[in-house]
Image (cartoon, rainbow, N blue to C red):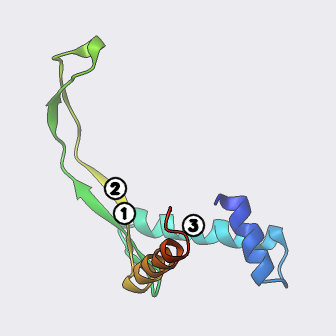
Amino acid sequence: MNKTELINKSQEKLQGFTKAELAMALDTITDTIQDALVAGEKVKLSGFGTFETRARKGRKGVSKLPKAMGKEWASVDRTVPVFNVSEGFKTRVIEANKLVAEVNPTV
């Protein structure tokens, strides 16, 4: 599902809002989450999951690509965003997949 499809599905459930209003709300929420992560904060949405950042150490390696075979390279230390799914969300998806598998065993 892409952003447009998400907005359309949301409008079906929230009929009092226009697509433009829902798009603006979605943009505002995602921008706010990004701003919080940049500031080093953690964003926890109960029943959905947690957005946070983690430090990744740089590493060294040797290229295996034909053009650069044997050349050494190094990546730098960096901070990356991560998302951890809540237990309730994870359980809901697992249970839904079990039901699909029972109804259609070829999936």
Position of residue 49 measured from the top left corner of the image (x, y, whole percent): 42, 78
The residue tagged 2 is 80
Q: Are marks 3 and 2 in contact (CB under 8 Å)?
A: no
Q: Secondary structure at mark 3?
A: helix
User: Residue 101 versus residue 37: which sits nearer the camera?
Assistant: 101
At a point 37% along the width and 75% down the height, the residue shown is 42
Q: Which mark is residue 82?
A: 1
> Going from the N terminus, do you reach mark 1 or mark 3 first?
3
Q: Amino acid at mark 1?
A: Val
Q: Are marks 2 and 1 in contact (CB under 8 Å)?
A: yes
The residue tagged 3 is 30
Q: Quadrant of the N terminus?
A: bottom right
At a point 15% along the width and 31% down the height, the residue shown is 61
Q: CA distance from mark 2 to mark 1?
A: 7 Å
At a point 19% along the width and 43% down the height, the residue shown is 58
Q: Secondary structure at mark 2?
A: strand
At a point 21% along the width and 15% down the height, the residue shown is 69
The local crowd at label 2, few if under 14, some if 14 to 19, many if 20 or more residues have their Cα within 10 Å, is few
Q: CA distance from mark 3 to mark 2?
A: 16 Å
Give the total of numbered labels.
3
Q: Are marks 1 and 3 in contact (CB under 8 Å)?
A: no
Q: Is residue 94 above or below residue 20?
A: below
Position of residue 84 measured from the top left corner of the image (x, y, whole percent): 36, 72
The local crowd at label 3, few if under 14, some if 14 to 19, many if 20 or more residues have their Cα within 10 Å, is few
Q: Is residue 38 left or right of residue 68?
A: right
Q: Which mark is residue 4?
A: none
